[in-house]
Amino acid sequence: MTNPIGEPPATLQLQVEIIGSDLDGQQFFELTRTLTIHRNGISILLAHKLAPDSEVIVRNPETSEEAIAFVVGQTRQDSTGHVYGLAFLDPPVNLW
C-alpha cells in the first residue's frame, strides 16, 4: 500500500487493537502491532481472516484514540497469520 504522493511507508511497530467481524461473520478483538504506517492507513498482522472492503475499528491502547478503517486487501499469509492493508476512512486521523 503506497500513499498518494508516493512516499514510502514508515516501518514502525506500534501496538494496536483491532475490533471487527471476521470472514465468518464472527466478531473479534485482537491485540496486534503495526508493520508499516502510511499517511492514510497501516499494515498489520492478524490471526483472523478478513473480507476485502470490510470495516474494522483500529484503537491505540495507549491513548484510547480510535478510527474506522476498511480492509484494502490481504498482502500475504504465512504460519504467523494474515497481513492486511487497512485504509482509514478519515485520512487526517492521528492515532499516534
Image (cartoon, rainbow, N blue to C red):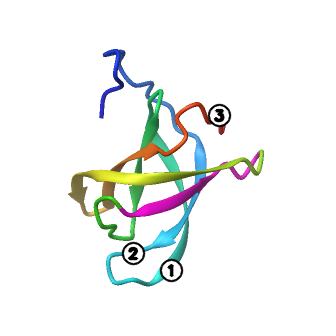
Check residue 23 for magenta coloring.
no
Task: Determine whether 77 is above or below 1 in the image.
Answer: below
* Residue 58 position by quadrant: bottom right
Marks 3/1: CA–CA distance: 25 Å
Hey, what amino acid is under mark 1?
A: Gln
Helix, strand or loop at mark 1: strand
Q: Residues within 10 Å of mark 1 (few under 14, many from 20)?
A: few
Q: Which mark is residue 27?
A: 1
Magenta residues, start to end: 54-62
Check residue 57 for magenta coloring.
yes
Marks 2/3: CA–CA distance: 25 Å
Indicate which disc, 2 or 1, sits on the residue closer to the N terminus: 2
Image location (x, y in percent) of residue 21: 45, 75
Q: Which mark is residue 22?
A: 2
Q: Residues within 10 Å of mark 2 (few under 14, many from 20)?
A: some
* Mark 3 and mark 1 residues within 8 Å of each other at the beta carbon: no
Indicate which disc, 2 or 3, sits on the residue closer to the N terminus: 2
Of the 4 image quadrants, the one containing the N terminus is: top left
**Closer to us: 44 or 94:** 94
Identify the residue shown where x is 44% and y is 40%.
42
Identify the residue shown where x is 41% and y is 61%.
46
Seen from this angle, which residue lies furthest right? 63
Badge 3 is on which residue? 94
Of the 4 image quadrants, the one containing the C terminus is: top right
Identify the residue shown where x is 45% and y is 61%.
55
Helix, strand or loop at mark 2: loop
Image location (x, y in percent) of residue 34: 49, 43
Hey, what amino acid is under mark 2?
A: Asp
Hey, what amino acid is under mark 3?
A: Asn
